[in-house]
Structure formats: structure tokens, C-alpha cells
Amino acid sequence: MKSAIQLIREVDRGQLLHDFEAALDDIVEAVEAHGGKGSITIKLSLSRKSDAYEVKGDLKFDVPQPPRLGAIFFFDSGAGELTRKDPRQPDLPAIVEADFNNSRKDNGHE
């Protein structure tokens, strides 16, 4: 009987092994970059077809993802939605920018 490694190497014309190696590379790269842990599962299904066996492979893997940043929201009961602006904080008066380009002119003299 063939070894399991030889069987995996030949299933799906070698694509299962190729995909396994690519998944392994992706997981190692992600663990190095973000930490965490990943996993790979290879599943072989065997069924009898007359005097032969059909072997199908399935590959599932989980690659660790970078952590996502949270954001603080407030519930605005008047609008019935979440908002980044605290509805209990009053609005500040608008800030007016100084206009340095329009200097005062007297009779054509500066």
C-alpha cells in the first residue's frame, strides 16, 4: 500500500499538495507578522468505484488575521442611531479663520 504522503502527493494531480504548501506558507507568514495561530486540515474521502477507488482531497485552513481596532460610538436616542459624536456634548461655536490676504487699504495706500 502507498504511504499517506505518496497518496496526498498524487490526489488531484498534485494540486492538493501544492495548495497545502501554499496554505502553510501563508499561515507561517501571518503568525510571524501578527502572532496568533493557524491551522490546516486535510481530508481524504475514499469511495469504491467498481474495481477501483476514487480518492478526493479537501483542504481547509485558517490564517491568523491582524487585530482590528475598536471605535467608540454613542447612542443618539433622538436619531435612534450610533454616532461618533457624544450627543450630550454641546456644539462649540464655529471657529472663524483670520483672513490675512485682505488687509486694510486707505485711499489706495497700504
Image (cartoon, rainbow, N blue to C red):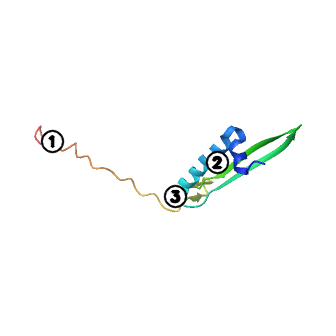
Marks 2 and 3, the one that precedes in the sequence:
2
Observer able to see residue 90: yes
Say which residue appears at 78% left-offset and 42% top-offset: 55
Mark seen at residue 105: 1
**Nearest to the observer: residue 51 or residue 94:** 51
Label 2 vs label 3, nearer the camera: 2
Q: CA distance from mark 3 to mark 1?
A: 66 Å
Q: Which residue is mark 2?
A: 20
Q: Is residue 43 left or right of residue 88?
A: right
Say which residue appears at 73% left-offset and 51% top-offset: 4
Look at the numbered discs 2 and 3 and tell me whether their residues touch, using CB distance below 8 Å: no
Q: What SS does tag 2 mark?
A: helix
Say which residue appears at 66% left-offset and 51% top-offset: 61
Q: Which residue is mark 3?
A: 32
Q: In the image, what residue type sits under mark 3?
A: Glu
Label 2 vs label 1, nearer the camera: 2
Mark seen at residue 23: none
Q: What SS does tag 1 mark?
A: loop
Q: In the image, what residue type sits under mark 2?
A: Phe
Residue 105 location, x and y as percent? 15, 42
